[in-house]
Image (spheres, grey):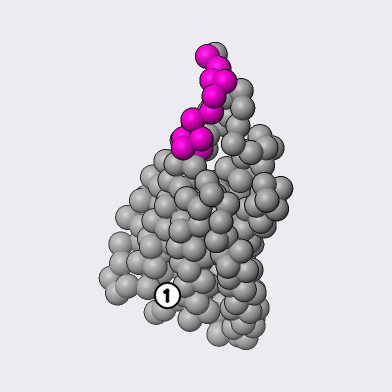
Amino acid sequence: MRFSFRPNEGAFYELFTRAAQNLVRGTELLNELALPDVEVQSVSERLTEVEHDSDQITHDLFKKINSTFITPFDREDIYRLGSLLDDVMDHLEAVGNLLYLYGLTKLPSLPREMHELVHVLDQQAKLTADAMPRLKSMKDLEDYWIEINRLENDGDQAYRMLLVRLFSGEYDALTVLKMKEVADELEAACDAFEHVANTVETIAVKES
């Protein structure tokens, strides 16, 4: 394997940015589930395509780390940030796949709180995509992780209200079990965005 002694720092930041842009694509696809007459299978398949692209970006990032002698910041932090971005995409894909496989979109409508969670994820994704290019300068990032944490709290509230609705008797037991699994993936995605933000904060503190 050929090693680069002088890091092409731009390559690392470009990969982080591409990974975060895929998260925006993922949440935009989930938003389509609120549209009338949505093709759920199409949404699920396109989410899988985006997830595969994210996997390739993560692979390219790890390959870049292993072929670069001096990295722009700690290798461990680069690995962690890349892995966490990929984790978010995995949760987003799982939401679309479960909704399709379980046939939940055949319900008259999905719970309002489920759409509220997707809205929170959409905001988190856009903030994350906007923040990744700023890693290069390590400037103007504090507002990003503060807002991501605030949104995660909003997501927790929506998740709790969704659970209240699921166990209110409005749905049959099997539907509750299916939707609870989807709800857990949505909540896990909110948490995963917060883990990304916390890692960015750790990196910024180390580099300051």
Instruction: Tell me which segment is drawn in magenta.
Output: 2-12
* Residue 62 appears left or right of 46: right
Q: Quadrant of residue 66?
A: top right
| Residue 56 sits above or below residue 198 on the image | above
| Residue 96 sits above or below residue 163 on the image | above
Residue 17, percent across and down?
Answer: 46, 48
SS label for mark 1? loop
Residue at x 53%, y 49% (from the top left corner): 137
Residue 178, percent across and down?
Answer: 56, 66
Residue 49, percent across and down?
Answer: 38, 45
| Residue 178 sits above or below residue 58 on the image | below
Regarding residue 25, the answer to whether it shows in the image is yes
- Where does the N terminus fall, quadrant-wise? top right
* Residue 205 appears left or right of 179: right
Q: Residue furthest top?
A: 1
Residue 178 versus residue 65: which sits nearer the camera? 65
Residue at x 67%, y 47% (from the top left corner): 207
Residue at x 49%, y 63% (from the top left corner): 127
Residue at x 63%, y 79% (from the top left corner): 157
Q: Circle 1 is placed at which residue position?
A: 107
Q: How many marks?
A: 1
* Residue 158 appears left or right of 104: right
Q: Residue furthest left?
A: 37
Magenta-colored segment: predominant secondary structure: loop
Residue 36 versus residue 176: which sits nearer the camera? 36
Which amino acid, mark 1? Leu
Residue 69, percent across and down?
Answer: 61, 23
